[in-house]
Amino acid sequence: MAERTTPIRVLIAKPGLDGHDRGAKVLARGLRDEGFEVIYTGLRRTVDAIVAAAIEEDVDVVGCSILSGAHATLLPKLVSSLRASGAGDVLVVAGGIIPEADRPALEQAGIAGIFGPGTTIAEVATFLRANARRR
Amino acid sequence: MPADAKHLAARRELAQGISAVERPGPAANQRIQAALAVSVAEARNALVVGLTGAPGAGKSSLAAALADVARAAGRRVAILAIDPSSHESGGALLGDRVRIDEHPDDDGRFTRSIATRGSGRSLAHVAAAATILVEAAGFDLIFVETVGAGQAEIGIARLADVLLVVEGPEGGDEVQAMKAGILEVADIVVVNKSDRPGAQGAFDRLRSGLALGAGAPELALVSATAGAGIGELLATIDEKGASRGARGRTRRVEAHLVAAAESHVDAQVREATASGALATRAEQIVAGTQSLTGSLAALFGITESPDA
Ligand code: B12
Ligand SMILES: Nc1nc2c(ncn2[C@@H]2O[C@H](COP(=O)(O)OP(=O)(O)O)[C@@H](O)[C@H]2O)c(=O)[nH]1
Ligand SMILES: [Mg+2]
């Protein structure tokens, strides 16, 4: 019987004290309409809280939205915590206000994709479908 | 390395188990049976509390508030939050965690968002199986939140040991109107947001309306966000659930069997619709070239025994 394949599960997180949530919400709704199961955690979550949520929800992708400038510390910490918790196969992507100059270091740290202002939902959806773990 | 990495291992195993039973089949069934065996061997006796009601009534906030009180008393608490999948895209936006604090270091808590996926009936097919796995993982108190919409109530009423219907301050009148449906299956009707004007009025309207029937549900007035009446509500829940005995677990298995049957039929209907077989058969029945009885057998394997 032609059963639909399992939707890709994505956690959309807002780490740290950043209160800009428009982008995260636009993305959450947009990805739902693209067929993803999107878990939105709300504002001001710690890295440990995001890791625990990613594990409890058994997501394939964690997407962080950061417009506060705290990406350089928060994102590498998130990747290493996920790895330490046995969730190293979860794809980590980020978006928001992340200067070009900071990107190589983040990519080095294991952030698979970085999406700035003007990104379309279709771009993000295509990237996640191509890069999220298969099951 | 974070201090909680080891802690998270247990939650990860449970989380992956729930994902596994979201894909129905013999492997999922084996996993569910193994979980049942664990619960029987360990003499588990989880209490499953259903929460239903309109979006925005405060179900997630209330589950979180009840979980906090129960956890403070040393109970191990899980929340399963079910939201509908989009029929068009198959995707879902699961936002209940926004209302539920994270406790990354506490293995006595577990929260999982569940999309209804193919379930035509809005209580996810996997809901019962998830409660069985969660019980085996050692959680005593399991909240299952589901959007109140038509058929979902029947599913959650079948699964839950104690069913809460949650209303906002605007409720009362409208609850009266649907009395025949929800209130028949509710164990406790909760008017939430007692911190807001109108809540007391809604509570009073409900009380006068409900006082009539025998076996009427309990009534509670609480504020999930201000923390008013939560301890009392938990006590009422425990009272209502106290008599369940071993019935709780068999109830969950029954709910899973029904969900599996519904899932099977839903898949057949999707298949027959997608392949065009449904439309073709309907045309043939209208044209008189096929019978209804023969078509039910051909499409869905339904064999009707002759009328007695
Ligand atoms: C609207 C806005 C606000 C609103 C926010 C409302 C809200 N609820 O979101 C308000 C007025 C509250 C606000 C406040 C502040 N803001 Co402001 N704000 C903006 C503004 C103008 C637009 C942001 C926005 O909503 N864009 C629309 C959304 C849809 O776009 P987006 O978030 O970029 O998301 C897109 C992509 O980035 C990507 N994306 C985003 N997240 C993710 C995640 C993933 C996983 C992926 C794949 C993609 C992705 O996809 C989205 C769709 O294309 C920006 C400037 C700008 N041009 O970005 C400043 C800006 C972000 N704000 C800024 C600042 C400094 C502040 C304040 C500190 C200002 C102050 N002194 O009061 C406060 C702090 C608020 C707080 N608590 O954190 C700075 C940040 C500077 C920095 N990072 O170095 C900016 C860049 C302005 C500037 N040039 O100085 N702000
Ligand atoms: N004033 C007040 N607001 C509440 C209360 N409980 C929930 N809310 C708010 O009601 C909205 C919906 O709550 P939520 O728990 O998400 O409702 P759900 O859709 O039924 O799960 C949120 O903005 C909550 O903060 C309460 O007791 N008092
Ligand atoms: Mg909710």
Image: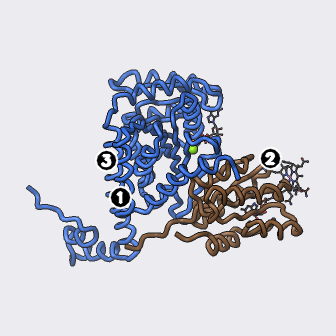
Chain colours: A brown, B blue
What is the C-alpha distance between the residues marked 2 and 1? 44 Å
Which is more toward the observer, B171 or B44?
Answer: B44
- Above or below, B271 against B106 in this view is below
Are the residues flagged by discs 2 and 3 in contact, CB closer than 8 Å? no
Q: Chain of mark 2?
A: A
Q: Chain of mark 3?
A: B
Look at the image and tell me whether residue B296 can be seen: yes
Residue B29 numbered mark, or none: 1
* Secondary structure of residue under mark 3: helix
Look at the image and tell me whether residue B150 can be seen: no
Same chain for the residues at labels 2 and 3, yes or no? Answer: no
Q: Chain of mark 1?
A: B
Residue tagged by mark 2? Answer: A17
Q: Is mark 1 within 8 Å of ligand 3?
A: no
> Looking at the rendering, which quadrant does residue B119 occupy?
bottom left
Mark 2 or mark 1, which is nearer to you? 1
Residue B254 numbered mark, or none: 3
Mark 1 or mark 3, which is nearer to you? 1
* Secondary structure of residue under mark 2: loop
Tell me which amino acid carries mark 3. Answer: Glu
Ligand 2: give its quadrant.
top right
Question: Which residue does the image show at 63% across and 75% down from the upper left?
Answer: A130
> Looking at the rendering, which quadrant does residue B261 occupy?
bottom left
Same chain for the residues at labels 1 and 3, yes or no? Answer: yes
Q: Is mark 2 within 8 Å of ligand 1?
A: yes
Circle 3 Cα neighbour tier, 10 Å, few/some/many (<14 / 14–19 / ≥20): some
Looking at the picture, how far across and down is residue B273, in whole percent?
Answer: 38, 71
Tell me which amino acid carries mark 1. Answer: Asn
